[in-house]
Amino acid sequence: MIDIGVNLTSSQFTGDEDTVVARARDAGVTGMILTGTDIESSREANSLAARYSGYAWSTAGVHPHDAKTVDDLALPAIRALAGKESVVAIGECGLDFNRDFSPRPQQEAVFEAHLALAVELQMPVFMHCRDAHERFMAIYRNYADNLPGAVLHCFTGSESELRDCLDAGVAIGITGWVCDERRGGELREVVRYIPDDRLLIETDAPYLIPRDLRPKPKSRRNEPCYLPHIAGTIAECRGQTWQHVVSVSLQNSRRIFCLPAA
């Protein structure tokens, strides 16, 4: 199985990357995609992907929280990183109107710049959307037909929002949010509506540790080694076997991100 969203550049993993990757391997995780959320972390993710060549790949982009730092919408640094062998997607990019760490007009302009670059380079796009569904979809639809692939990672939206995304050709990343009995109730209901060929699984480590892990870990740090547990919860919600969820999500990861077979 492939964890499509790992923030291995997080300070929570500093100096512990080898151990985290080893635990993931031991748990049956056969690959991971390291998320770039700004220029620096995108470069670091690329370096880590090269360090774990053949097992890890990376994305290159600027998260909407950091859109305010972008002063050139040609995105020259992201463009340069996109040419690296281990970079498999443009992003993380999108809109976040929940916290508004960057002004909304700037978020929208930077999101469009990422989409335009992904179209130009014919690379899949790795996206984020929180409390911004209507604007997100309005912008995305302008580029959808010309993108080779698109993933909305860490989906936590409603059934109607899910159907909008599916109608626009977006693949859906599901995290341990689905394991949260307090906040994940709606997601547990709607995850069944994701077609097999659009389902992807991820941890978003070190964030969103599954709340129902037993025994309860001493650390609140999420890790890729918990991906099999997340897959099991997804399978239960979808009325499918664990093996089926792992198999289809693996096929989707390889296809969308053009990853080599194991």
Image (cartoon, rainbow, N blue to C red):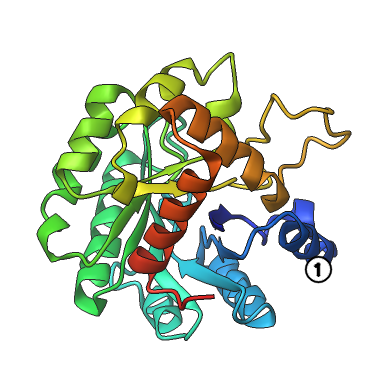
Pick the front one: 154 or 117: 154
Circle 1 residue: 18
Question: Of all residues shown, which one is farthest toward the right?
Answer: 218
Q: Residue at x 43, y 77 (%)?
A: 77
Point out residue 90 in the picture as x, y percentages from the top left corner.
Answer: 37, 66
> In the rendered view of the protein, which quadrant contains the C terminus?
bottom right
Q: How many marks?
A: 1
Point out residue 48 in the picture as x, y percentages from the top left corner.
Answer: 66, 74
- Above or below: residue 36 compared with residue 213: below
Mark 1 Cα within 10 Å, few/some/many (few <14, many 20+)?
Answer: few
Q: Residue at x 68, y 35 (%)?
A: 209
Quadrant in the rendering for residue 232: top right
Point out residue 205 in the picture as x, y percentages from the top left corner.
Answer: 65, 47
The amino acid type found where label 1 is placed reads Asp
Point out residue 39 in the picture as x, y percentages from the top left corner.
Answer: 51, 68
Q: Residue at x 54, y 60 (%)?
A: 35
